[in-house]
Image (cartoon, rainbow, N blue to C red):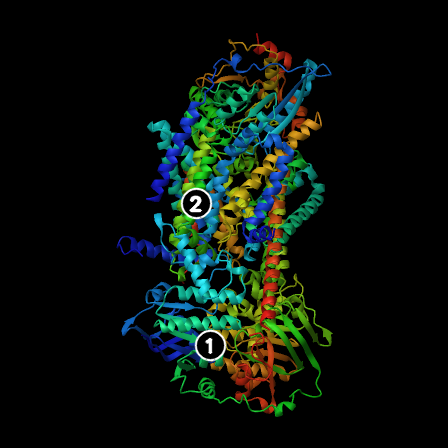
């Protein structure tokens, strides 16, 4: 059996794991549950050898081991299917599935026939209909995910970690996956199954381990626990999925204010199918939902960074026609990304330059712009919004994640845009900074700015959002406002447990 | 890691030097350059003279002019291999327009700027829009430019620069300050202005550091990069004019070696291939290192083969001190 | 018919497609300008192969490095190194040509391993490391051979440019050897690891593959191929020259990129062959273009500046075309994907 | 293990190929120049002129005023051949210092059935296979300028006497400076045959005149590099009386102008009009600097063409020519004397150097040239 005890892991200021534990017995399927940021992904990555834990111990069959690399993880019989996939897109299916474990043939060659046979058997077993010589990048996302699972299974693990693999899968593929997982279970393999889909837990799993805020809060057999209780342990609230929608009469839309943004039947292939939304001036709109339900694409489409494939958007009374973020910024839109490293922060540039990036971005190219100006501008912003961050001339990379995020928010607030878009801005940000960020956003809204904030941590939306749109599978599954802003309704909508989504539709 | 007691002090020292080089590339380059000169003087005492320092100063200036555009392009995350070709073509244009008469300087200047901007524009469009590696694209464009210069000049460029223009480059004020320094009084502030005092420069650093973030900030990344190539083209063209002002008569491909020379000077000055980091001050110091290195190799009176092997090894050594890419495991 | 279309559309998705299109264009141009009868004569084909074999193999060698995510611009002067070592070991030590060749190949492998240390172990920027190496090797070459000299025994060079069975260029044996080695390597784990390392060293490392080790293998194979190319060059010229082929370093890189390689993990040996073929065919076409012009217009005195200008312009345009075809490919891919997606969605609904 | 196997296979294949090649009859290489080149003369055309298709192959043209003039001289000589019953059509191909491309182009020209191939080769070796094929195809093949030294190739070379260029310069330096004078020696390129030959000439002259070389450097035939090297030598504070340089002397003079350093008493040699002009201007007021202006005449190509035309008429080269090469065994080389040269005291025609000013101005960066006419070539070189 595999066991982790008292695991601790911090990323900068954020505590991801705080004494969490997990057990996996042979021949059982264990659901690992938790809301976003509960630490379950971190746990998986520690077992996979991607992260090293700060404290705690991992034991295999009662012996304490250390897992320092992916290879070590494999050697202990652990195989992982990652949510973000470990496949190499420019290589063929065959090569990817056999990478690092090629069957040896004569003269040190790979036994192609055997490899093909193995891969074919694997593809057949998983019911994947694809050419094994095709490049991964030419395959559908769902097929890629199936291949990721197949690759993990092909390593004949004793412990199989499946991290949110069903999200991109179709109904029939999920059934195949379930069948295989059950077969593995019959063979005595331990399986840890991470999912957001509640229905799957009862269909497939024997045991559940629920995590919250980096701690393991509940372990139980699926026979002894029901959905409401699971949601309770995940969120600290009981859901009201079946509580009725009478209150829905209250749209929560403010009266007497101008509509700034009017989204109708918006579609963005292949992640957003049909979204309707209205945002008024001075309003804070929250966007909630599990990961990968189309929120990032929706927000980027408003910025002109993602191509709209259907529907229409009215912005400030005109048709929204941003060809690129340049147009959007000039049109008074600001964007704060939660993916700091890739999309927001300039790590080697100074803090003041990072804060002034919005100011730098717009205006005459030849304009005179001294370091002093930038410093004054940024220190002004820092003072005005009471952002405490290190010395202005230090590089941004010297800051913690939370402070980097404040930096990025300060960048846009200082520009005073009409519409500020935030995509999961508090991801990995500590509680204190988060509170400050909320305060800033509220001040801005009070000043007439419209804020659209998407967050994977829905609790925070209650605090700041006037209305919350809940995304599920590329559609708005519910809109919560006023009295309907309850944890229970939100959780239900996030899980797709509302009348809007029929089974099978786009599943 | 080596655990040998003999190697440890050496690796430690090297680690310290390398750390210093990465923190203060400009100062490191200055130390390196002066060190090379000190070594030269130690070996060949005659190498220390007002006249020699004046010449070295002049050569450093010329290389630093040629490297100015390269610095910008590298900061913006690109690479410009047309520097040498543009310099050579500008030199030929200058002599063939001036034909020994100073009055035609402005015409020559205008045509050279036009040429530099045009080549830079093509570089920019082909690297950003077409998305091919800058190294290969600019190399191909540089080749076409060079070939065209042969067609136009039929292989024998004509004319000379005007005498006043020539002496505005090579005359030595008070016997030792090269007149080229007067151009530096215009060029350096211009480059410093573009890099550190203009909105363009600010955007350039952001684009080089993180193009995706810059794009989402509302910076027109392709435009900024293209402009950096255009400025590089124009600066190269102007340097070509000054270069031929020094040598007075032009030849095809006369400054081709500057493509690599400028690249190394820029890298030694602390600008990284990764983009977003770098200073022009560092480039000037890096140019000095290159000039001092060549000067030392000549002063040591080496045979050509020894000279080339030494040059290669010293370059490797300098590169090891700077610009190490990060490993897979961090 | 449907099968043909299917296999064509699969071919369109491979990296070699753009190179193939360009190569076909250049080949057609060459055949037209030279006249099909002349072009396809065994003699002419034999010469085409024997005189371009070194370059072709060099591009293949460069391609192996590109697969593993690095490059070597000193590969050109390394050819001269092989040439010089081969000739001088024969001349000074009285070795047989075959033994001398083995020394030449060994020299190329040593040079490649040194560069591996600089690029993969010390992690210098590959462009500048290669530039520095060019100087070092050039100096070493002149140390070994101070002036062009030496000969290869007649039977060897005659064999190289002869036609087997009267129509097969003997030089093709070298290509066959290189391709056979590659065919073997492709079937070893190295054949896939090299792509993984080039495309995503992190993921490759996670899968238990050492990027540094794989790059060492890539550099050694590149060294071996460079050695074979150097022997071809030696057989072709039947003598030694310490300063030759230097600019083949950058040219081989350009050829590989034109053939469809990218910097890291994308591209096959076919790309190298097509890319090299394109460059060779364009140069050859330019020869025949001016040959034809001189015939058609008597008294025409075209300076050779035009040759180079036209050749380099076509090469530049070829580079641009690469991306146009690649874009078309990507677009086709997207449409394909969309279609599949829709179909799937329908069938489920 | 695998690699060993591959090596073995490779060696095996090569040996096999060699055996296969050896089986084909090898044409003996004639050492007699007359026998080497006597193809049947082509039929006369409609205009009564004998058509001769000439392919001129050059290693490089771009950036090299010598080679540009070389090609132009061949064109002029080709046009002039009409007066002697030949309609010479001229096509030129350049290999950009790429030996493989050169071989390909030469082989193409052989296949295309040119009557006369004139080669200024990339390297002084490496064309044996090509030469043999040309001979088998009955094509007249002459190697011009860069002497092809591969022993036993049996090819006729026509070139300038590079050794003499170095030698004459060093002798003139010795005459001007006197024994014991300190000189700087700037060679062209290590590892290059022409440069090496000139160096031998320089060394012979230096020894005879008892000059002392105080510094050595190289300019790679690159004008800018020559100036930079000279600047660096001046920086090094080397004391010297004169400079010996393998062409590009004018680039070195630039270095003196740039730094304002007093000129040495002697510099040589270079072949361009610019250099002549420079010397005239520097010495106009008073005698400042002695020099050697020496034309490495690009006309060798034109001369080679005219020699070839005589061979086409079936005439036989004289065996008692004074210019046979004695540097290499088995190499047939007509080394033309360097007829055009001038020093301060001794220039052509006995005119003062200042009388050459217009001529020098006209030349510019071009070089003075001289090629032997059809009549001259016939009279001098043939029975």
Q: Which of D83 and A275 is in front in this view?
A: A275
Residue A30 spot, x, y in % from top left: 39, 78
Vertical placement of B41 versus B278: above or below? above
* Residue C315 in view here: yes
In the image, C286: left or right of C214? right
Q: Which of D258 and B248 is in front in this view?
A: B248
* Secondary structure of residue under mark 1: loop
The chain identifier of the residue carrying mark 2 reads C
Residue A98 in which image quadrant: bottom left
Residue C249 spot, x, y in % from top left: 50, 42
Write down the residue under mark 2: C182
Instruction: Give the residue at x 46% y 50%.
Output: C126
* Residue B65 in view here: no
Image quarter where the C terminus of chain A lies is bottom right
The chain identifier of the residue carrying mark 1 reads A
Instruction: Give the residue at x 53% y 87%.
Output: A487
Q: Which of A336 and B321 is in front in this view?
A: A336
Q: Which residue ends up furthest to the top in the rendered image?
A: D383
**Contact flag, marks 2 and 1 (Cβ < 8 Å):** no
Write down the residue under mark 1: A195
Counting other residues with Cα less than 10 Å from the Cα at mark 2, is it few (<14), some (14-19), or many (20 or more)? Answer: some
* Secondary structure of residue under mark 2: helix
């Amino acid at each position: 059996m595999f066991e982790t005890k008292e695991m601790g892991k911090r990323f900068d200021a954020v505590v991801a794991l705080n004494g969490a534990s997990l057990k996996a017995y042979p021949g059982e399927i264990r659901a690992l549950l938790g809301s976003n940021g509960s630490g379950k992904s971190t746990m998986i990555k520690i077992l996979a050898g991607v992260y090293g834990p700060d404290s705690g111990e991992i034991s295999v069959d009662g012996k304490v081991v250390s897992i320092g690399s992916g290879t070590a993880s494999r050697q202990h019989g652990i195989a992982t299917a990652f949510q973000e996939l470990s496949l190499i897109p420019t290589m063929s299916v065959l090569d990817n599935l056999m990478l690092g474990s090629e069957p040896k043939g004569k003269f040190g060659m790979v036994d192609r026939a055997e490899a093909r046979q193995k891969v074919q058997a694997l593809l057949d077993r998983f019911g994947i209909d694809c050419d094994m010589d095709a490049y991964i990048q030419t395959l559908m996302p769902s097929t890629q995910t199936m291949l990721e699972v197949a690759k993990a299974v092909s390593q004949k693990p004793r412990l199989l970690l499946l991290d949110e693999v069903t999200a991109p899968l179709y109904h029939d593929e999920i059934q195949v996956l379930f069948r295989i997982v059950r077969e593995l279970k019959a063979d005595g393999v331990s399986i840890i199954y991470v999912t957001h889909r509640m229905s799957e837990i009862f269909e497939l799993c024997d045991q559940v381990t629920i995590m919250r805020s980096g701690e393991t809060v509940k372990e139980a057999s699926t026979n002894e626990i029901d959905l409401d209780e699971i949601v309770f342990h995940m969120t600290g609230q009981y859901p009201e999925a079946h509580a009725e929608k009478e209150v829905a009469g209250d749209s929560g839309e403010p009266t007497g204010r101008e509509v700034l943004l009017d989204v109708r039947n918006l579609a963005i292939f292949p992640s957003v199918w049909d979204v309707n939304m209205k945002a008024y001036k001075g309003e804070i709109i929250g966007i909630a939902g599990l990961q990968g339900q189309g929120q990032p694409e929706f927000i980027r489409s408003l910025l002109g960074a993602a191509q709209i494939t259907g529907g229409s958007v009215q912005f400030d009374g005109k048709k929204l026609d941003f060809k690129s973020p340049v147009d959007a910024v000039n049109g008074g839109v600001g964007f704060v990304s939660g993916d700091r490293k890739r999309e927001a922060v300039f790590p080697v540039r100074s803090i003041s330059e990072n804060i002034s990036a919005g100011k730098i971005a717009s205006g005459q190219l030849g304009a005179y712009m001294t370091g002093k100006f930038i410093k004054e501008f940024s220190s002004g912003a820092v003072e005005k919004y009471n952002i405490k961050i290190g010395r202005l001339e230090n590089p941004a990379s010297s800051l913690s994640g939370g402070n980097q995020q404040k930096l990025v928010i300060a960048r846009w607030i200082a520009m005073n845009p009409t519409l500020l878009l935030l995509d999961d801005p508090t991801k990995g940000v500590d509680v204190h900074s988060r509170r400050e960020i909320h305060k800033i956003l509220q001040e801005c809204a009070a000043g007439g700015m419209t804020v659209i904030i998407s967050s994977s941590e829905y609790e925070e939306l209650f605090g700041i959002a006037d209305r919350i749109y809940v995304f599920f599978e590329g559609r708005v599954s519910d809109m919560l406002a006023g009295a309907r802003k309850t944890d229970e309704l939100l959780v239900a909508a996030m899980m797709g447990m509302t009348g809007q989504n029929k089974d099978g539709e786009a599943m | 890691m080596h655990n040998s007691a003999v190697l440890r002090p050496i690796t430690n020292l090297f680690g310290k030097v390398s750390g210093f080089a990465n923190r203060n590339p400009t100062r490191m380059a200055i130390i390196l350059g002066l060190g090379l000169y000190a070594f030269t003087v130690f070996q060949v005492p005659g190498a220390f003279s007002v006249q020699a320092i004046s010449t070295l100063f002049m050569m450093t200036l010329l290389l630093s002019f040629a490297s100015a555009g390269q610095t910008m392009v590298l900061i913006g995350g690109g690479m410009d291999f047309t520097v040498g070709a543009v310099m050579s073509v500008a030199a030929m244009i200058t002599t063939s327009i001036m034909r020994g008469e100073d009055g035609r300087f402005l015409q020559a200047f205008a045509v050279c700027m036009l040429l530099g901007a045009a080549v830079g524009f093509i570089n920019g469009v082909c690297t950003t829009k077409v998305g091919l590696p800058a190294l290969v694209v600019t190399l191909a464009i540089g080749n076409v430019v060079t070939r065209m210069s042969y067609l136009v000049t039929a292989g024998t460029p004509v004319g000379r620069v005007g005498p006043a223009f020539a002496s505005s480059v090579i005359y030595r004020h008070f016997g030792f300050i090269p007149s080229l320094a007067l151009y530096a009084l215009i060029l350096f502030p211009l480059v410093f202005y573009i890099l550190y005092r203009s909105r363009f420069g600010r955007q350039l650093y952001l684009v080089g550091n993180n193009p995706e973030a810059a794009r989402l900030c509302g910076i027109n990344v392709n435009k900024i990069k293209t402009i950096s190539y255009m400025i590089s083209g124009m600066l190269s063209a102007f340097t070509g004019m000054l270069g031929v002002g020094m040598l007075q008569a032009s030849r095809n491909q006369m400054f081709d070696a500057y493509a690599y020379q400028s690249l190394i000077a820029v890298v030694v000055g602390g600008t990284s291939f990764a983009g977003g980091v770098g200073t022009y001050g560092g480039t000037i110091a890096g140019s000095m290192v290159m000039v001092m290195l060549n000067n030392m190799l000549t002063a040591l009176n080496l045979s050509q083969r020894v000279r080339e092997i030494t040059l290669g090894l010293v370059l490797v050594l300098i590169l090891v001190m700077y610009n190490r890419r990060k490993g897979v495991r961090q | 018919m449907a099968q043909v279309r299917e296999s064509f559309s699969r071919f369109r998705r491979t990296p070699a497609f753009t190179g193939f299109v360009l190569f076909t264009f250049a080949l057609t141009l060459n055949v037209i300008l030279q006249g099909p009868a002349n072009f396809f004569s065994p003699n002419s084909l034999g010469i085409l192969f024997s005189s371009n074999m070194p370059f072709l193999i060099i591009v293949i060698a460069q391609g192996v490095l590109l697969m593993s995510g690095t490059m070597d611009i000193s590969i050109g002067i390394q050819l001269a190194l092989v040439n010089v070592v081969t000739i001088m070991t024969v001349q000074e030590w009285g070795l047989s040509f075959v033994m001398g060749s083995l020394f030449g190949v060994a020299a190329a492998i040593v040079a490649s391993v040194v560069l591996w240390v600089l690029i993969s172990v010390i992690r210098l920027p590959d462009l500048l490391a290669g530039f520095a190496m060019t100087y070092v090797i050039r100096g070493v070459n002149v140390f070994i051979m101070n002036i062009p000299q030496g000969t290869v025994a007649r039977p060897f060079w005659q064999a190289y440019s002869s036609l087997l069975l009267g129509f097969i260029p003997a030089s093709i044996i070298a290509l066959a050897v290189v391709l056979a080695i590659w065919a073997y390597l492709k079937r070893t784990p190295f054949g896939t690891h090299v792509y993984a390392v080039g495309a995503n060293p992190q993921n490759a490392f996670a899968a238990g593959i050492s990027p540094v080790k794989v790059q060492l293998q890539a550099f050694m194979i590149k060294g071996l191929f460079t050695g074979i190319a150097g022997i071809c060059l030696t057989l072709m010229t039947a003598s030694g020259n310490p300063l030759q082929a230097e600019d083949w370093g950058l040219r081989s890189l350009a050829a590989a990129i034109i053939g469809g390689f990218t910097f890291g993990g994308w591209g096959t040996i076919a790309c190298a062959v097509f890319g090299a073929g394109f460059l060779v065919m364009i140069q050859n076409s330019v020869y025949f273009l001016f040959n034809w012009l001189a015939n058609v217009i008597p008294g025409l005195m075209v300076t050779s500046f035009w040759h180079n200008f036209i050749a380099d312009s076509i090469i530049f345009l070829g580079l641009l075309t690469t991306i146009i075809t690649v874009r078309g490919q990507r677009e086709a891919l997207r449409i394909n994907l969309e279609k599949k997606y829709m179909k799937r969605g329908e069938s489920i609904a | 293990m695998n690699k060993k196997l591959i090596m073995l296979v490779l060696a095996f294949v090569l040996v096999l190929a060699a055996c296969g090649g050896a089986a084909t009859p090898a044409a003996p290489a004639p050492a007699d120049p007359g026998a080497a080149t006597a193809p049947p003369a082509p039929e006369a055309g409609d205009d009564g002129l004998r058509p001769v298709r000439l392919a001129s192959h050059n290693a490089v043209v771009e950036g090299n005023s010598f080679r540009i003039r070389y090609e132009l001289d061949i064109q002029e000589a080709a046009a002039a051949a009409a007066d002697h019953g030949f309609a010479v059509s001229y096509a030129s191909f350049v290999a950009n210092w790429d030996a493989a491309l050169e071989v390909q182009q030469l082989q193409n020209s052989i296949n295309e059935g040119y009557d006369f191939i004139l080669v200024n080769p990339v390297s002084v070796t490496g064309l044996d296979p090509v030469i043999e094929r040309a001979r088998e195809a009955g094509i007249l093949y002459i190697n011009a300028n860069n002497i092809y030294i591969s022993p036993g190739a049996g090819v006729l070379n026509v070139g300038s006497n590079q050794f003499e260029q170095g030698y004459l310069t060093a002798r003139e330096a010795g005459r001007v400076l006197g024994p014991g004078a300190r000189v700087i020696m700037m060679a062209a390129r290590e590892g290059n045959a022409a440069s090496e030959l000139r160096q031998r000439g320089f060394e012979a002259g230096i020894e005879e005149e008892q000059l002392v070389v105080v510094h050595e450097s190289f300019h790679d035939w690159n004008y800018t590099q020559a100036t930079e090297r000279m600047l660096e030598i001046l920086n090094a504070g080397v004391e010297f009386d004169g400079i010996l340089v393998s062409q590009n002397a004018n680039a070195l003079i630039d270095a003196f102008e740039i730094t304002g350093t007093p000129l040495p008493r002697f510099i040589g040699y270079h072949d361009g009009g610019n250099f002549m002009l420079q010397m005239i201007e520097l010495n106009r007021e008073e005698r400042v600097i002695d020099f050697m202006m020496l034309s490495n005449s690009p006309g060798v190509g034109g001369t080679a063409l005219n020699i070839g035309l005589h061979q086409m008429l079936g005439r036989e080269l004289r065996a008692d020519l004074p210019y046979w090469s004695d540097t290499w065994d088995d190499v047939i080389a007509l080394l033309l004397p360097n007829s055009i040269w001038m020093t301060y005291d001794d220039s052509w025609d006995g005119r003062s150097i200042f009388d050459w000013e217009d001529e020098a101005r006209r030349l510019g960066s071009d070089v003075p040239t001289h090629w032997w006419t059809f009549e001259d070539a016939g009279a001098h070189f043939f029975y």
